[in-house]
Amino acid sequence: MVTITPSARDYFSSLLAQQPDGTHLRIRIERPGSPTAEVELAYCPQGEHHEDDEVLDCQTFKLFIEANSMAALAEAMIDFEANTMGGELTIRAPGLKGDKPAQGAPLTERVQWVLEARINPMVASHGGHVSLVKVTEENDVLLQFGGGCQGCGMVDVTLKQGIETTMKQELPEIRSVMDATDHSSGTNPYYS
């Protein structure tokens, strides 16, 4: 079940007070249970919810929860923390991106999960993506950069300080992370 903290409830109530009467909220997950899952929380005008939505009564408003998103939102908590910039809304859902592969899973599977869950969301902000070419017998990870990463002048920094550091924190058995990309053929690098 989704938990909404009192501060989040108050925050939503103040936002909804500025909307037409009968407006509530609806939450759904795009690609639930996958490393690329994303939360969509939006206004839900009166009568626009789906019949199979679960309804959470939050006293001053209702939160409609898409039926297909229920499993990914099990034990989810929505919180709002006020700060000098206004505040920060956080949604914590342990099942959102599915389960991290077990320690005993093949290294290739665990590397792929780290790429999809941790690395690609970061490089996507620059229009890039990273894919796994292979994991060698010596536990070296060979990656292919694409999109805004291909031909980017900062790719070495991204590789060593971002990707390799993250990979080794998550998977200490990795010896090194290497780039297999032909950066001279990049057509739209983020940094030239």
Image (spheres, grey):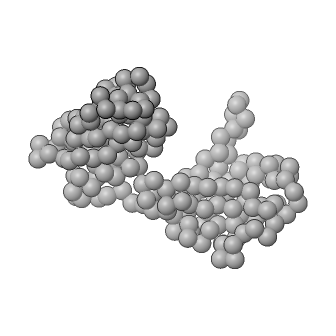
Residue 36 as seen in the image, left or right of residue 155: right
| Residue visible at 43% across and 32% down in the picture | 188
Residue 171: horizontal and vertical position, in percent? 27, 44
Q: Residue furthest bottom?
A: 51
Q: Is residue 151 above or below residue 69?
A: above
In the picture, measured across the screen, residue 64 lies left or right of residue 179, that is: right
| Quadrant position of residue 35 | bottom left
Q: Residue sitting at 69 percent across and 77 percent down?
A: 51
Taking the view exactly as shown, the residue that stands out farthest to the right is 21
Q: Is residue 169 visible?
A: no
Residue at position x 66%, y 72% in the image: 54
Give how far across and how far down residue 164 sits, in percent.
29, 35
Please give left or right for residue 67 compared with residue 158 in the image: right
Q: Where does residue 117 sit, x and y in percent of width and height?
A: 41, 49
| Residue 98 shows in the view | yes
Q: How many marks?
A: 0
Query: Toward which corner of the image does residue 21 lie, by quadrant?
Result: bottom right
Q: Is residue 137 above or below residue 33?
A: above
Q: Quadrant of the N terminus?
A: bottom right
Classify residue 62 as left or right of residue 162. Answer: right
Q: Is residue 176 above or below residue 7?
A: above
Q: For the view shown, which residue lies furthest in the left direction?
A: 137
At 41% from the left and 22% from the top, the residue drawn is: 192
Q: Nearer the viewer, residue 90 or 130?
A: 130
Front-most of residues 174 and 46: 46
- Give the image location of residue 149, x and y in percent: 38, 34
Up-down relation of residue 22 to residue 110 (above or below): below
Viewer-proximal residue, 86 or 150? 150
